[in-house]
Image (spheres, grey):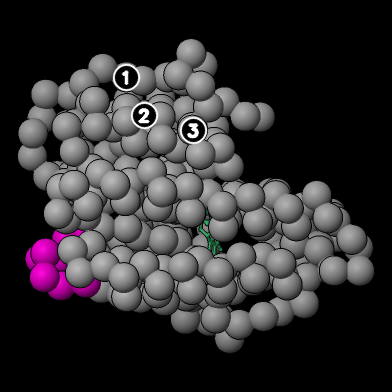
Amino acid sequence: MTASTSSTATVQSTSTSRTGKVVLITGASSGIGEATARLLAAAGHRVFLGARRADRLAAVVKEIRAGGGTADHRELDVTCLESVRDFVRAAQESYGRVDVLVNNAGVMPLAMLEALKVDEWNRMIDVNIRGVLHGIAAVLPVMREQGAGHIVNVASVAGHRVDPTAAVYCATKFAVRAISEGLRQESRDLRVTVVSPGFTRTELTGGIGDLGMRAVAEDMMGIAIPATAIGEAIVYAVSQPAEVDVNEIVVRPTAQG
Ligand code: NDP
């Protein structure tokens, strides 16, 4: 589904809280993005959640607000640059600035290359690489204007090593690390962080179309750590003082080889 225009998007009312950083999170409707949003809000930051499943976002926002946190959301498809720009504009309208973007949205339909699942290759490239680039394109002018900002890109252990069935997924995550390193080197006023999770208990394996492959992946997830373990790493990076740029964090289960 592509839902990027302002007519189909959902924006919740502006919060009155004016404390904490303004943190935008893509892929916040489940898993790592959702956990990160909850943890950041609990730490006093103002979070703005994006993903395609707006009903899920609304439910998370409601719970954060019920707990005293500050949160808003907007429907977002990271494969569409205009949708990402609308998302960032909506956050600015709600909170007046953008301190941090967490480029977290991602998909992982694993399969052998010989299966020629070209549509799935393209989807991974569109969400995992183009989505991250769209996020950077949408916030960079805002952050340059502010003279400060922080971009957190969620890569993966798969951005450090290649395994069978994961060639294209790994390629997208290697790309996220390369893009992040280039952005870091080009920036003296922005902080750039790559967070690379290992096996983490989320909905990610649900997107594997090959049922045999999905069963194998879900079996490997037996040792997975909770999404909050990754969220805590992101909170740590975001919470550092302005002159401290945490460049890379790898968090994997102790039992993962
Ligand atoms: P989930 O499937 O739980 O979350 C993925 C999120 O991405 C969802 O919120 C989904 O929301 C969103 N998303 C997917 N496509 C789009 C799109 N086109 N536009 C906007 N949002 C989109 O998995 P995780 O929490 O595990 O994944 C988060 C990140 O962590 C990903 O980048 C993944 O590659 C990475 N990662 C995860 C690991 C793991 O073991 N779980 C390990 C290493 C890295 P919606 O469908 O509502 O749009």
Tell me if residue 244 is in the magenta stretch. Answer: yes
Instruction: Say what secondary structure mark 2 lies in.
Output: strand
> Is residue 73 shown to the viewer in this render?
yes
Disc 1 and disc 2 in contact, CB within 8 angstroms: yes
Q: Amino acid at mark 3?
A: Glu
Q: Amino acid at mark 1?
A: Gln
Disc 2 and disc 3 in contact, CB within 8 angstroms: no
- Name the residue tied to disc 3: 82
Disc on the earlier residue, 2 or 3:
2
Q: Position of residue 246 (x, y in %)?
A: 25, 73
Q: Between residue 142 and residue 251, name the one nearer to us.
A: 142
* Stretch of the chain drawn in magenta: 238-245
- Name the residue tied to disc 2: 73
Q: Between residue 230 and residue 5, name the one nearer to us.
A: 5
Q: Is residue 253 above or below residue 14?
A: below
Q: Between residue 211 and residue 72, name the one nearer to us.
A: 72
Q: Position of residue 107 (x, y in %)?
A: 62, 52
Quadrant location, the C terminus: bottom right
Residue at left offset 62%, top offset 29%: 2
The mark closer to the camera, 2 or 3, is 3
Disc on the earlier residue, 1 or 3:
1
Gap between marks 2 and 3 measured at Cα: 16 Å
